[in-house]
Amino acid sequence: MTVLIIGYPESGKSELAENMVMEMASPGERVYLATMIPCGDEGAARVERHRKMREGKGFETIEAPFDVASSVEENGGCADRTVLLECLSNLAANELFERHVSADAAADRISSDIARLKGFVRDLVIVSNHYEIKADFDEETVMYAKMLDTLNDRISAVADKVIRIEP
């Protein structure tokens, strides 16, 4: 089963996703794909908060800021495990701003990577953000938000279940 959880930042998506994975899989069958590249104190604090949230919950963490399918393969695969990908938004930012690829190329790369990942895990729960584009967003932020909407649409089309958390 593939589940996509979409919501605004700080909407409780991560907690919902972790609880869902805990219902779907036993300890030892839970994998947390951490995609964030922490930037500065705020990024480090967010990573630490997420680590504390899943402490003692039986997750194996795989750091995967790029190429999530390959990261899982390199760690022995997960055919009998449930994977929580936290989060699609970070993967998008990593491709755009760290690898410096175009929005279209990034969306294509991430979509195909997730399709590959789906093929060799038992269950996949994906967390993603949604941003309302505001008049004060700069061009780069608008591009990122639109690309993330494209990714959310693509993953929604192949997910078994989509949960949208509204404000």
Image: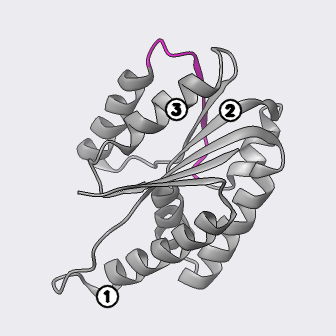
Neighbour class for label 2 at 10 Å: few (<14), some, many (≥20)? many
Residues at circles 3 and 1 in contact by the CB criterion of under 8 Å: no
Q: Is residue 98 above or below residue 167?
A: below
Q: Residue at x 22, y 81 (%)?
A: 137
* Quadrant of the image occupied by residue 26: top right
Give the x, y percent position of residue 60: 62, 23
Secondary structure of residue under mark 3: helix
Q: Please tell me whether mark 1 sits on a helix, a strand or a loop.
A: helix
Q: Which mark is residue 20?
A: 3
Please tell me which residue lies in front, 114 or 125.
125
Q: Residue at x 76, y 50 (%)?
A: 118
Question: Disc 3 residue type?
Answer: Met
Which circle's residue, 2 or 1, is located before the other in the chain?
Answer: 2
- Please determine whether, in this image, residue 143 is positioned above or below residue 111: below
Q: Mark 2 or mark 3, which is nearer the start of the sequence?
A: 3
Residue to which mark 2 is pinned: 82
Q: Which residue is mark 1?
A: 139
User: In this picture, is 48 found above or below 142?
Assistant: above
- 14 left or right, relative to 161: left
Q: Earlier in the sequence, mark 3 or mark 1?
A: 3
Residue at x 20% of width, y 81% of height: 134
Residue at 29 percent across and 58 percent down: it is 166
Q: Name the spot of residue 92 as percent of width and height, x first.
A: 51, 65
Span shown in magenta:
55-65
